[in-house]
Each structure stands twice: as C-alpha cells, then as structure tokens.
Image (cartoon, grey):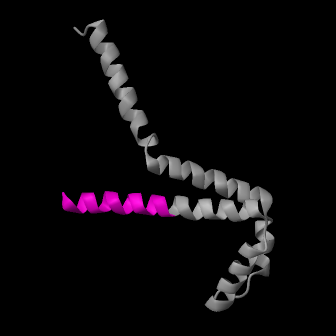
Amino acid sequence: MESQIKRNVMRRVRTIHAVRPFTGGTALAAVFLVLSLYAIGRAVFVAQVFRNMPAVEDVFAVSRFFLSAFLNTDFVVQALTIFVAASALWMVRDALKVLTQYRAV
C-alpha cells in the first residue's frame, strides 16, 4: 500500500525526469535554431534565392553567391544567419560531447 506522500514524491520525480532533456543548452540552441530559421523564412524569399543560385557543381561560384547574398541583405537577416550557424555549431558540439562520453563507457 503506497502512501499519499510517496505518490506525490514519485510524481514529481517523474515530472523532473521527463522535463530534464528540455532544460539544457542543446534544447535552447534548438529553439534558437528553429526561431531563427522561421524568421529568415519570413524575411527572405528563400525559393527565389535557390532559383538564382548557380550550379551546385561549381563550388566557388556557389560560395561567392552565398557570400554576396549574405553581404547584400538586411542586418536582421545577417544576424539571424549568424544565430543559425551558432545554434547549429552548439548542437553539433553537444552531440559530439555525448558521442565521446558514450564511446568512453
């Protein structure tokens, strides 16, 4: 027979265990990534950017195109692009950290 106190404590433990993955730096980076991508999608006609892009085989032309597109856009889009890159790098860093911990075990 379980007591009321034990049920309350275990419910709180399960809640904390369920919420824990959403409180770390990776979750925050994922939120920033999604919000930044959404804001870029609202500010830029992304389909038109891909239509104007040169052939993917010409790596130097593609890199010049994206550099030119980045430099000739609004400051807000530039800042959001930097947020996307930083969030993606943060998530990759955390994923590599988890993988190295997994390999060590």
Q: Which residues are magenta?
A: 89-105
- Location of the C terminus by quadrant is bottom left
Quadrant where the image shows the N terminus: top left
Residue 41 image position (x, y, % from top left): 74, 59
Image side of residue 2 versus residue 59, left or right: left
Lateral position of residue 45 relative to residue 65, left or right: right
Counting labels gives 0
Q: Position of residue 33 (x, y in %)?
A: 59, 55
Q: Nearer the viewer, residue 70 or 96?
A: 70
Is residue 91 found inside the magenta-colored segment of the image?
yes
Q: Nearer the viewer, residue 28 or 11?
A: 28
Residue 16, image x, y percentages: 38, 30
| Nearer to the camera, 68 or 51 | 68
- Residue 82 percent location from the top left of the image: 62, 64
Dominant SS type (magenta): helix
Residue at 34% of width from left, 14% of height from top?
A: 8
Q: Could you say which quadrant of the image residue 68 lies in?
A: bottom right
Magenta span has 32? no
Which residue: 70% across, 65% down? Answer: 78
Question: Looking at the picture, does residue 47 appear above or below residue 17?
Answer: below
Is 38 positioned to the left or the right of 92 in the image?
right
Residue situated furthest left in the rendering? 105
Instruction: Kindly indicate the quadrant of the structure image that contains residue 6.
Output: top left
